[in-house]
Image (cartoon, rainbow, N blue to C red):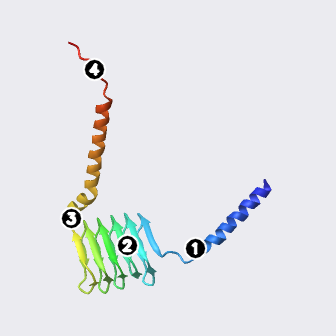
Amino acid sequence: MRFLSRRLLISLLGIAAFCAPAFADGSHDRTQFGHDIVVGPDEQVNEVTCFGCSVRIRGHVDADVTTFGGSIYVEESGDVGADTTSFGGDVRLDKGSTVHDITVFGGHIRRDPNASVEGDVTTFTGSVWLLLIFGLPFVILGAFIALIVWVVRRLTRPQVPVTA
């Protein structure tokens, strides 16, 4: 028994030693569920994704910034190198901020005249777009499930003898 526990301990230490270099540099991605993300002024992050929360950018994001149910604030020295996408939230660009492309579904863009957008700006304001994008698939799925239930009930209905 003691030999087995020593062997297990040595194996775990070996695995930890070989796995440590893989996590040493990190991926520099940030993903959160329900907690806001703040990229500080001296930070450089690869990609930011937020579900049910907002993102505040004061530093540099190399790739995409995406929120679902939250807003994106790119402050004075903030910089986003790729797409800035918000589903169900707003995008605010302060003076001196730089982004590449902006896409907003169900929110608004608030842009300072001194903010720089290097690519396209696409906005679908209003809740109708959110209903079409997120609600319509659920309606179709519900109709499909109702059809399956109807067919199964119809095929498994017991036969009633006809009396004359």
Distance from Cα at disc 4 to Cα at disc 2 = 63 Å
Q: Residues within 10 Å of mark 1 (few under 14, many from 20)?
A: few
Per the image, label 4 sits on a secondary structure element best described as loop
The quadrant of the image that shows the C terminus is top left
- Whether label 4 touches label 2, CB < 8 Å: no
Distance from Cα at disc 4 to Cα at disc 3 = 54 Å
Image vertical order of residue 152 relative to residue 1, above or below: above
Residue type, mark 1 in image: Ala
Image vertical order of residue 153 relative to residue 163, above or below: below
Whole-percent x and y of residue 131? 24, 58
Per the image, label 1 sits on a secondary structure element best described as helix
Identity of the residue drawn at 27% across and 72% down: 103
Task: Name the residue beneath numbered marker 1.
Answer: 22
Residue type, mark 4 in image: Val
Per the image, label 3 sits on a secondary structure element best described as loop
Identity of the residue drawn at 27% across and 41% down: 147
Per the image, label 2 sits on a secondary structure element best described as strand
